[in-house]
């Protein structure tokens, strides 16, 4: 449909029709049997009844047959027969669930994320969906925050690469194409900087850091063409983001160039009242419309007051028309005016959902996401060895995160199911060993239902005794431990990041009877792994790996796949360090000769450094990396510097190493980080094989937000590192002219 045709529709719409396009409701308003997925307040919203027919979008309902029928019903009841947008939280898969985003970032392979998003879009669109609320583009430096699991980590460059990949996977070159859907960048802006890691809490970030570090991930998604942006729950400069006119009009739309649809997060418009910024619902409607928020997710605020504000002259008609036009344009970009049902098709559902090709892609992505943190020679393990699998995740089906709403845990492959396909049937044992959670952990504490049986202390001791007996008889013990999947996600902030005490006690007991223990760590965030690392001979971080998690784990345990993941976030030595991240600013009281040993920026009881740093990850083989070479030592805007290293596989297995390029701007108008990731390449090498890895450094890579607020580079001295983690020490220098 041409723009002039959309304009003609807009001009002919009634005020109520226009307001209706701004309203989004949850699926249960139309299908009582639909499972209600609630992520915010659940009080009665008081929506005028007419808007049930005029609503512009519906969330959290899916299924081709159901949505085709619902689309027909809604269009029949709308005077201009405007199709409805169907939206859903599709974070890391629709039915075939890939590793949680933090695990995806650990692959250092954005292409795998693009493929995963493409598969999710194919499955979701076949089920009738048009918009997926992802990718989450928030910079995250505090693992206490539960929504770390949705993020791509602590580095702006890393986030940008993966956000771009996700958007392109969803949307392709044209959202009208079969199997494509609209991406929604979230949460704008700064949501990942919540104070104390407590969800929905205040965000206090200085303006320079906000622009230089926090906005970069969102910008990457917008530059990739994302059709929608979602507001955040937090304040920015003391004003709730959802009502922040400067943030949304000046920064998002003017400076960042976003021309798509802006949607509130769940009930966020109404929550501006609770913040103490809006006086009442009428005031909230006015302020959020003025800020440019196009869609009100799951409140009645816009429905009840936008029309009245326009009739009273308190809100200009143009503001409403601009919002409606953006929504109509998105529907047009998706091709809904030509085909309101787009790809919704029952037969496609049967063909695509969890098909072998999709499951195989999920298996590969999961295996590539695992990070080997420690290995004293016991991995990989031969399937013929006498092996004991001991731990609560041995036969656990919930390998999905809380953000895999549409996934089916029953379809997940457990470790035991996968191991039974490969390991010796006589010499291999499988035991739970202990509960997933400490016995005193209550549903009241988590505020949601826990699918765990009640265990007495006597039962736990018996389970432990049986586990120790089998462990003592085994050549090697594999212990799948970790966070319960409901402990990561929205509203799951944690003050302590240890494994449950009942699991640590099991680990300690097992290692006393058999020291050959490899621990598999399931988590949606970095954990405090000091005790685990001390007791176990091998530690493998497997995140929340998704549908094919069991197969992927066995692939890596047996050496069919050599682990190649790297940490996208630093793992703290302890909670007291948080936030701890590699790309921190230089301090004037670091290690230098003139500084008194006492008066330095350090802790007196713990190290400054994390337990495991950003970019860290081992392999079953060993790699040697040469010192970095530069083909020149002076850079201008007209040329580039070729930076290279030679990497050689000197171990016993074929494997992959990820070479990471870091740069430091030594002196600038604002203090710059000690290192910044500027590039990475994963290289696959056979035993004995070597290869030169080349990075190109140009002036654009050196730009930053300068003291005067402008973006650009500054001449001077720069340092270059190329290594296999942020801990790389040897560097070379060059000058920007």
Image: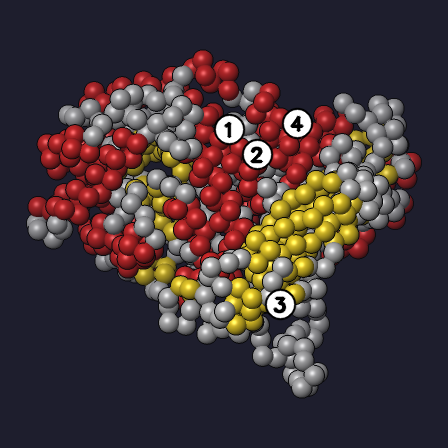
The answer to which image quadrant residue 364 occupies is: top right
Q: Mark 1 or mark 2, which has the lower sequence index?
A: 2
Relative to residue 56, is residue 178 drawn left or right? right
**Residue 173 image position (x, y, % from top left):** 40, 33
Q: Kindly identify which residue carries mark 3.
A: 733
The mark that comes first in sequence, 4 or 1, is 1
Percent coordinates x, y for residue 731 in the rendering: 67, 64
- 3D distance between C-alphas at marks 1 and 2: 10 Å
| Res. 170 in view | yes
Q: Which residue is label 2 attached to?
A: 98
Q: Residues within 10 Å of mark 1 (few under 14, many from 20)?
A: many
Q: Are marks 1 and 2 in contact (CB under 8 Å)?
A: yes
> Residues under labels 4 and 1: Cα distance?
19 Å
At x 14%, y 43%, the residue is 307
- Which mark is on residue 413? 4
How far, Cα to Cα, is label 1 from label 3?
Answer: 43 Å
Q: Which residue is mark 1?
A: 119
Helix, strand or loop under label 4: loop
| Front-most of residues 153 and 715 | 715
Label 1 secondary element: helix
């Amino acid at each position: 449909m041409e723009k002039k045709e959309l304009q003609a529709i807009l001009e002919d719409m009634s005020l109520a029709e226009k307001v209706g396009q701004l309203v989004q409701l949850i699926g249960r308003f139309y299908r009582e049997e639909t499972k209600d997925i609630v992520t915010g307040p659940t009080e009665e919203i008081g929506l005028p009844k007419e808007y049930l027919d005029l609503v512009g979008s519906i969330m959290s309902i899916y299924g081709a047959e159901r949505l085709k029928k619902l689309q027909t019903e809604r269009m029949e009841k709308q005077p201009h027969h405007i199709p409805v947008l169907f939206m859903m939280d599709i974070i890391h898969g629709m039915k075939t669930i890939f590793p949680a985003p933090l695990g995806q970032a650990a692959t250092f392979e954005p292409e795998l994320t693009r493929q995963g998003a493409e598969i999710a879009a194919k499955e979701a669109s076949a089920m009738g969906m048009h918009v997926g609320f992802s990718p989450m583009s928030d910079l995250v430096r505090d693992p206490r925050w539960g929504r770390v699991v949705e993020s791509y980590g602590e580095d702006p460059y890393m986030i940008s690469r993966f956000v771009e990949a996700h958007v392109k996977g969803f949307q392709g070159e044209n959202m009208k194409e079969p199997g494509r859907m609209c991406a929604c960048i979230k949460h704008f802006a700064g949501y990942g900087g919540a104070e104390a890691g407590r969800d929905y809490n205040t965000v206090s970030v200085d303006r320079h850091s906000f622009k230089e570090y926090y906005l970069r991930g969102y910008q990457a998604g917008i530059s990739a063409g994302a059709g929608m942006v979602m507001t955040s729950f937090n304040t920015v400069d003391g004003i709730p983001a959802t009502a922040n006119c400067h943030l949304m009009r000046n920064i998002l739309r003017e400076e960042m160039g976003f021309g798509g649809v802006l949607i509130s997060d769940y009930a966020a418009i109404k929550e501006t009242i609770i913040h103490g910024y809006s006086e009442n619902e009428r005031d909230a409607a006015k302020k959020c419309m003025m800020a440019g928020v196009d869609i009100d997710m799951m409140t009645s605020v816009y429905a009840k007051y936008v029309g009245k504000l326009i009739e009273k002259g308190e809100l200009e008609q143009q503001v409403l028309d601009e919002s409606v036009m953006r929504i109509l344009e998105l529907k047009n970009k998706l091709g809904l005016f030509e085909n309101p049902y787009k790809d919704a098709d029952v037969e496609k559902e049967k063909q695509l959902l969890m098909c072998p090709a999709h499951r195989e892609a999920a298996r590969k992505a999961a295996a590539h996401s695992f990070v080997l943190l420690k290995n004293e020679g016991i991995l990989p393990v031969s399937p013929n060895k006498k092996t004991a699998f001991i731990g609560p995740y041995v036969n656990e089906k919930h390998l999905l995160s809380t953000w895999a709403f549409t996934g089916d845990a029953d379809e997940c492959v457990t470790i035991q199911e996968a191991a039974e396909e490969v390991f010796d049937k006589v010499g291999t044992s499988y035991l739970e060993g202990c509960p997933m959670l400490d016995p005193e952990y209550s549903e009241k504490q988590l505020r949601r239902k826990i699918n765990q049986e009640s265990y007495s202390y006597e039962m736990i001791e018996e389970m432990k005794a049986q586990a120790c007996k089998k462990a003592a008889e085994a050549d090697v013990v594999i212990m799948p431990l970790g966070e319960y999947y409901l402990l990561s996600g929205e509203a799951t902030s944690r003050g302590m990041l240890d494994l449950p005490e009942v699991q640590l006690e099991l680990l300690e007991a097992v290692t006393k009877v058999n020291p050959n223990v490899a621990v598999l760590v399931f988590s949606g965030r970095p954990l405090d792994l000091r005790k685990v690392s001390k007791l176990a001979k091998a530690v493998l971080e497997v995140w929340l790996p998704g549908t094919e998690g069991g197969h992927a784990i066995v692939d890596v345990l047996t050496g069919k796949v050599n682990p190649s993941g790297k940490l996208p976030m630093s793992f703290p030595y302890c909670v007291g360090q948080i936030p701890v991240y590699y790309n921190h600013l230089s301090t004037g009281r670091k290690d230098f000769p003139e500084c008194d040993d006492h008066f330095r920026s350090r802790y007196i009881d713990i190290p400054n450094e994390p337990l495991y740093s950003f970019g860290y990850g081992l392999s079953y083989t060993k790699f040697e990396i040469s010192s970095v070479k530069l083909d020149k030592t002076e850079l201008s805007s007209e040329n580039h510097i070729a930076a290279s290293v030679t990497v050689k596989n000197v171990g016993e297995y074929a494997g992959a190493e990820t070479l990471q390029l870091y740069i430091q701007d030594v002196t600038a108008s604002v203090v710059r980080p000690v290192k910044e990731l500027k590039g990475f390449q994963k290289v696959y090498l056979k035993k004995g094989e070597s290869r030169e890895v080349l990075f190109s450094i140009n002036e654009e890579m050196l730009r930053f937000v300068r003291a005067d607020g402008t973006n650009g580079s500054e001449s001077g001295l720069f340092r270059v590192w190329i290594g296999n983690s942020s801990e790389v020490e040897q560097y070379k220098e060059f000058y920007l002219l």
